[in-house]
Amino acid sequence: MRKESKKFLRDYLNANSPTGFETAGQKIWLEYMKQYIDEYEVDVYGSVVGVINPGQKYKVVIEAHADEIAWFVNYIDDKGYIYVIRNGGSDHQIAPSMRVHLHTPKGKVDGIFGWPAIHVRNKDREPSPSLANLTIDVGAADKKEVLAMGIDVGTVVTFDAEMMELNKKYVVARAIDNRGGGFMIAEVARLLKENKIKLPYTLYVVNAVQEEIGLRGAEMISRRLKPDVAIVTDVTHDTHSPMYDKKTQGDTKCGGGPAVTTGPAVQNNLLKMIIDVANENKIAIQRQA
């Protein structure tokens, strides 16, 4: 990977852009895209569209989503402990002892999901993490001190976990879902520009918001653009990892090539075209249903 692309990937993955608050990541994505597109637009909710070869009758979309799962502050008790609810599909089971950022009007506040040490837990009835017993500690003595930090009900919370590389081959990050897709479609725009490829249609490179709460951004932008074709990117699972069942979750793995999905909503002619192009160019792909 060229160094400019890798820097963009790292900066983009490390940005805090939870569902409904995607501005920080969208700014990074758009700034990178500007050099490779003809024009752009941003809708009222924050979805960003880079346009290549505008004004053509036939319209094609390639899409990713910009948001990441997160939490909302829901309750602050008198001792200053903070209880949360999900913003998207956040996993309560991985939360204990995770560091977090609380995003306030005064700036970012550091915190941590507390959890009792192993030697003080009841061995006969080991507690399971849940939204009822998980709390965030920001080092405050009481609720008044929490409020003074700028934290209140509705404050959005993200995990403090930045991009890292494994064995110089794989990228691990908090928001691969779906900044990985956002990176890919941005690189498509770059390669079209650098290779001076003239498209016979208008290409809309869409980085949509609010996917994690029901595809809201993509729904809104598709109604405005009314594309003839849309190719949507997102993440999938490495089912070669422990605790996956290939019989129910399919057979896909990191490094095996992009996974191409079959389903009722997938246009069959487009799917066949993608598979044929991959085969003709000896590009490894994986199949998923």
Image: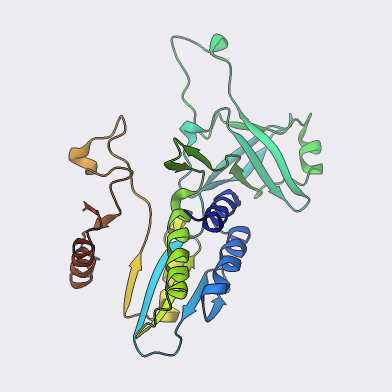
- Locate residue 148, reporting x and y percent: 82, 43
Side (left or right) of 236 relative to 52:
left
Considering depth in this image, is 52 or 196 the residue closer to the camera? 196
Q: Is residue 222 above or below residue 94?
A: below
- Locate residue 218, reporting x and y percent: 43, 68
Q: Is residue 122 above or below residue 234?
A: above
- The answer to whether residue 61 shows anywhere in this view is yes
User: Who's the residue at 58% across and 32% down the image?
Assistant: 98
Q: Is residue 236 above or below residue 121?
A: below
- The answer to whether residue 18 shows anywhere in this view is no
- Locate residue 221, reporting x and y percent: 46, 74
Q: Is residue 280 above or below residue 129?
A: below
- Locate residue 159, reporting x and y percent: 58, 41
User: Who's the residue at 51% across and 77% down the image?
Assistant: 37
Side (left or right) of 262 relative to 37:
left
Considering depth in this image, is 116 or 191 the residue closer to the camera? 191
